[in-house]
Amino acid sequence: MIKKILIANRGDVALRVLRACRDMGIETVAVHSTADADAMHVRLADESVCIGGAPSSESYLNVPSIITAATITGADAIHPGVGFLSENADFARVVDAHGLTFIGPRIEHITAMGDKVEAKRTAADSGLPLVPGSDGAVATIDEARSVAEEVGYPVLVKAASGGGGRGMKVAATADDLAEAFSSARTEAKAAFGDDTVYLERYLDNPRHIEVQVVADSHGNVIHLGERECSVQRRHQKLLEEAPSPVLDSAQRDHIGTIAAQAAAKMGYLGLGTMEFLYENGEFFFIEMNTRLQVEHPITEEITGIDLVCEQIRIAAGEKLSVTQDEVTFKGHAIECRINAEHPETFFPTPGTVTNFHTAGGPGVRVDSFLNSGYAIPPYYDSLIAKLVVYGDDREHCLSRLRRALQECIIEPMPTSLDLHRKLVVDDDIISGNYTIRWLEEEFFAKDNAS
Ligand code: ADP
């Protein structure tokens, strides 16, 4: 039985977990940095503890402070949210060692999936199809050359510890390989303290389609369908939808079943997302995220299942609330990530919000921690709101989304709202005809020309 949860996060995700706790009658403890003393998650939680200075290294990544906060408030579980310590196996181990429940997967799976080389090996052993590439890490340029010859150019050099699209470099031909290999390693070392890299064939024009899996400690594993996340810039997602406009129900069952079987074979526990590239009717596994995803609300909208409540119940040792046969997919949902960022450079644009108004009405959900007068701190992620819209079908969803985007006001800083307003009237988005390169290679070119 979990009675009190400490939420080791901030922003919209801290609020998301807090709301699930309230719905379940569980008490909440917010933790915050000195820069977040007035933040919404602090105001709304039952209790709050300041855990350190503004930089995340002093607060949201400060494990001793977080554990102390949990101990002094008598919390019995910790929810790590998204980002920060959510995929940190050492943190999960420390939480466990203090007799607290970590609301997440088993430590061994965080470790295995945190290293992408290891993740691909585990995925292959569990029966998932991989992007052709190196068998494990590639240590030297000579090795890289021979792998690239084998899989064929273009190739992608990727960081084993990668995340957020960093440490990833394309080599179009053999002439580019040495440069791509060394710059991927340098970037990986700087970003993750680990310069281990591996090679994959750089797929021409795939879509990014991921599958949500959920597993309990009683051996039940289900999938909750897919999310289409191909609208990306700099390998980062901007708009996601469920279901994917290109899969029919037979394809959904196929990839969902494969993903759930792989999770079962691994002995996985909790929420997990298997990410695939999809090209010419084939799926290729790229990585697995062992946590709640930013884009989880669209799955909640089309299945009616609260993923955070499910996650908490699983951590408490309960069974999944539904069987695979009871899962039904109904309607269509789209999420727009609203970032405080410059529309062209994508640099963050923190500052004080003078005017904030959220959209509302049927089918509209806004997960945000903003209010008028709130000063967005410069220290953290630029995601400030998630606009999630549901409709009976894709067309209905897009029409409600246009209405909702018109209603949103966030002033005075530039945000990605303007970009989303252009996206939802674009013919390719309306027809669902886009891939991972579409935004950067086609949409921005059209937009600049007009
Ligand atoms: P990260 O963990 O840094 O986000 P991922 O492996 O999840 O890295 O890949 C992020 C994005 O990069 C994918 O959604 C896709 O757009 C692109 N990508 C990754 N691997 C490949 C590949 N082999 N071919 C083409 N694009 C790729």
Image: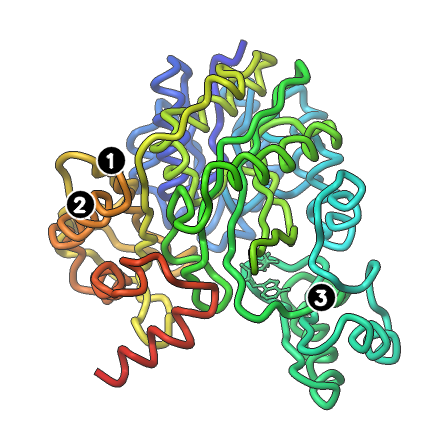
| Residue 354 % position (x, y) | 14, 56
Please name whichever residue, 134 or 84, is drawn nearer the observer in this view of the structure.
134
Q: Residue at x 24, y 44 (%)?
A: 397
Element under label 2?
helix
Answer whether residue 103 is visible to the viewer in this image: no
Task: Give the numbered dot on residue 400.
Answer: 2
Element under label 1?
loop
Measure the alpha-carbon separation of dots 2 and 1: 10 Å
Mark 1 C-beta closer than 8 Å to ligand 1: no
Query: Mark 3 highlights which residue?
Result: 200
The quadrant of the image that shows the C terminus is bottom left
Q: Residue at x 13, y 47 (%)?
A: 357
Mark 2 C-beta closer than 8 Å to ligand 1: no
> In the image, 394: left or right of 50?
left
Question: Which of pointers 3 and 2 lies earlier in the amino acid sequence?
Answer: 3
Q: Residue at x 59, y 51 (%)?
A: 276
* Image quadrant where residue 142 sits: bottom right
| Residue 109 % position (x, y) | 71, 37
Question: Which of pointers 3 and 1 lies earlier in the amino acid sequence?
Answer: 3
Query: Mark 1 highlights which residue?
Result: 392
* Image quarter where ligand 1 lies: bottom right
> In the image, 251: left or right of 133?
left
| Residue 51 % position (x, y) | 49, 40
Measure the alpha-carbon separation of dots 3 and 1: 39 Å
Element under label 3?
strand
Q: Nearer the viewer, mark 2 or mark 1?
A: 1
Please name whichever residue, 311 or 133, is drawn nearer the observer in this view of the structure.
133
The quadrant of the image that shows the N terminus is top right
Q: Residue at x 38, y 13 (%)?
A: 25
Mark 3 C-beta closer than 8 Å to ligand 1: yes
Answer whether residue 91 is visible to the viewer in this image: yes
